[in-house]
Amino acid sequence: MRVVIADDSLLVREGIASLLRRSGVDVVGEADDGDQLVQLVDELEPDVAIVDVRMPPTHTEEGLEAARRVRDRHPRTGILILSQHVEVGIAMRALVESPQGLGYLLKERVTDVEDFASTLRHVAGGGSALDPQIVSRLLADPRGEGPLGTLTPREREVLELVAEGRTNKAIADRLDVTQRAVTKHVTSIFSKLDLPPGEDDHRRILAVLTFLRR
């Protein structure tokens, strides 16, 4: 898997690159702004581009805009957006626009190298992934009203893992249950949310996000 990293902090870029190389990931390029990122992707055609949300010159959403440009020019290149803080609005916009091959993680997740590399491979393969903290915010339903309020605690747990982009097998491993049990939970969840079940990862997460936007 070939990866490029875009972050205006040299320490962050080098830190991520070092961790990934130790996990066998081929880091082929580094950029410190959006324009350089687009140029690198044009030249190197990596499997995944890791992009910080906030980059020069204004440090607002230049990274997100660069990610959109990469997606328009290289639709097969996966995009993993990194953020310092939980920014639900940005995550929602990015994923609902085009969830295939797109992930959104907090930078603190990078330290779990095995899980981070696994997420990269998932995104490179066309899957979608959301940071668990983002998922928790999206699924928060303080009033306890609506279809989300009808889910059992276990179903909510399964739904969070579905939204993180995990397969039924991965969910079963995480919860220490059978895949058959997970399939039943997923079927029940989508029935309660009035959403058609689907096995394709990006369709599943899109369905979850579409429902949560209502």
Image (cartoon, rainbow, N blue to C red):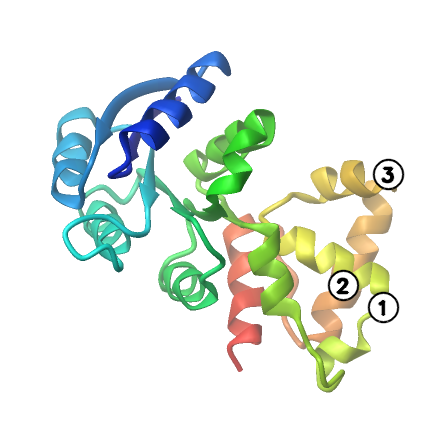
- Measure the C-alpha gap from mark 1 to mark 2: 6 Å
The percent position of residue 126, horizontal first and vertical second, equals 44, 41
- Measure the C-alpha gap from mark 3 to mark 1: 18 Å
Query: Would residue 87 appear left or right of 3 to someone viewing this image?
Result: right
In the picture, the disc for residue 133 is none
Residue 204 in sight in this render = no
Q: How crowded is mark 1: few (under 14 residues within 10 Å), some or many (20 or more)?
A: few
Residue 134 vertical placement versus 127 (above, below):
below
Residue behind mark 1: 152
Q: Do the residues labelled 3 and 1 touch (CB within 8 Å)?
A: no
Residue located 80% across and 50% down the image: 182
What residue type is disc 3 on? Asp
Quadrant in which residue 212 is drawn: bottom right
Q: Are marks 1 and 2 in contact (CB under 8 Å)?
A: yes
**Circle 2 SS class:** helix
The percent position of residue 147, horizontal first and vertical second, equals 72, 80
The percent position of residue 189, horizontal first and vertical second, equals 75, 66
Quadrant in which residue 207 is drawn: bottom right
Q: Earlier in the sequence, mark 2 or mark 3?
A: 2
**Circle 3 SS class:** loop
Query: Would residue 112 appear left or right of 68 to someone viewing this image?
Result: right
**Circle 1 SS class:** loop
Residue located 27% across and 29% down the image: 10
Residue behind mark 2: 156
Residue behind mark 3: 176
Q: How crowded is mark 2: few (under 14 residues within 10 Å), some or many (20 or more)?
A: some
